[in-house]
Structure formats: C-alpha cells, structure tokens
Image: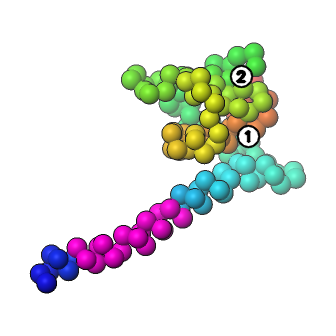
Amino acid sequence: MSPTERTKHRVAALLPALALAAGTLVMAALVAPPPALAAAGEPGAEVTAAPASEAKALLERYAVEGLSESVLLRPRAEGSAVRSIEIDDDGSVLVNGKDFDPEELVSFLGEDGQRLAALAALDADGRRAALGLE
C-alpha cells in the first residue's frame, strides 16, 4: 500500500469521529441557550449587557425600525437573500414574511440567527431598549 493510500485510509477512518464531534458541537449550540437567555432565567439577573451586545452586532448589519407592534430589520448590504426580519412584540420572528423558530434562524442566518433568537426571547420593551428604540 502506497503512502498516499495509507493516508486516505487513515482519513477515511477518522471521518465518522470528526462528523460525530462536529454534530455534537452543533447540537450543543442549538440546545444550550445563548448567554442572555440563560441569565434571563435567573431571578434578578442582569441581562442588559448581553442583549445590548447582541443588538450592537445586528445594528452594524441591519437598519432597524420600530413599528407599532414589532421591530423591523432590513439588511444594509445590497444583494442579501434576506429582505426583512420582523420580530413581533410576542417574540415571533418572520424572515422575508416566513415564520422562523430559533433553530431555523440559526440554520439560515448563523450567528445573526442566534442574536435574533436572543432578542426575540426578551419582552417587547427589553427588545426595543436593546436596539436603542426607546
């Protein structure tokens, strides 16, 4: 067996373990609540810093507008697949008019999806405050 073939066999033997490890990390990220949400469940916990940092990252990429019963985000970059993101006062999130749950947000938008899920978990006043709308 040539050195190249041995390397191929070794890599092929490692692939299932690597896939399992990667899948475990993805599942942990989806199952574990973002820090802002974890802290929100603790009585008297200070959660304003985390939502503010999440919002700041979103404000760099999205223009934000407060509507009567929701918050509307539009991408600043032209050519984005996302035209609009709306977070209703009840915490539901619509991307391009389609309802997204937290897992779908993360799958479709990555880190921005995690940030949006953290903001959606806040009450309407907390969300608006984090985005600088109040």
Q: Residue furthest right?
A: 43
| Contact (Cβ within 8 Å) of mark 1 with mark 2 | no
Residue 122 visible in image: yes
Question: Does 101 sit above or below residue 38?
Answer: above
User: In the image, which residues are magenta?
Assistant: 8-24
Task: Give left or right: position of 84 versus 66.
Answer: left
Reading the image, the residue beneath label 2 is 70
Task: Give left or right: position of 88 versus 86.
Answer: right
Residue 54 visible in image: no
Question: Residue 103's spot in the image, x, y percent?
Answer: 60, 45
Reading the image, the residue beneath label 1 is 121
Q: Quadrant of residue 49?
A: top right
Question: Does 126 sit above or below residue 34?
Answer: above
Helix, strand or loop status at disc 1 = loop
Mark 1, other Cα within 10 Å: few <14 / some 14–19 / many ≥20: some
Report the amino acid beneath label 1: Ala
**Mark sitting earlier along the chain (1/2):** 2
Dominant secondary-structure state across the stretch colored magenta: helix
Report if residue 111 lies within the magenta region: no
* Image quarter in which the C terminus is found: top right
Report the amino acid beneath label 2: Ser
Helix, strand or loop status at disc 2 = strand
Q: Quadrant of residue 18?
A: bottom left
Query: Residue drawn 58% across and 39% down?
Result: 105
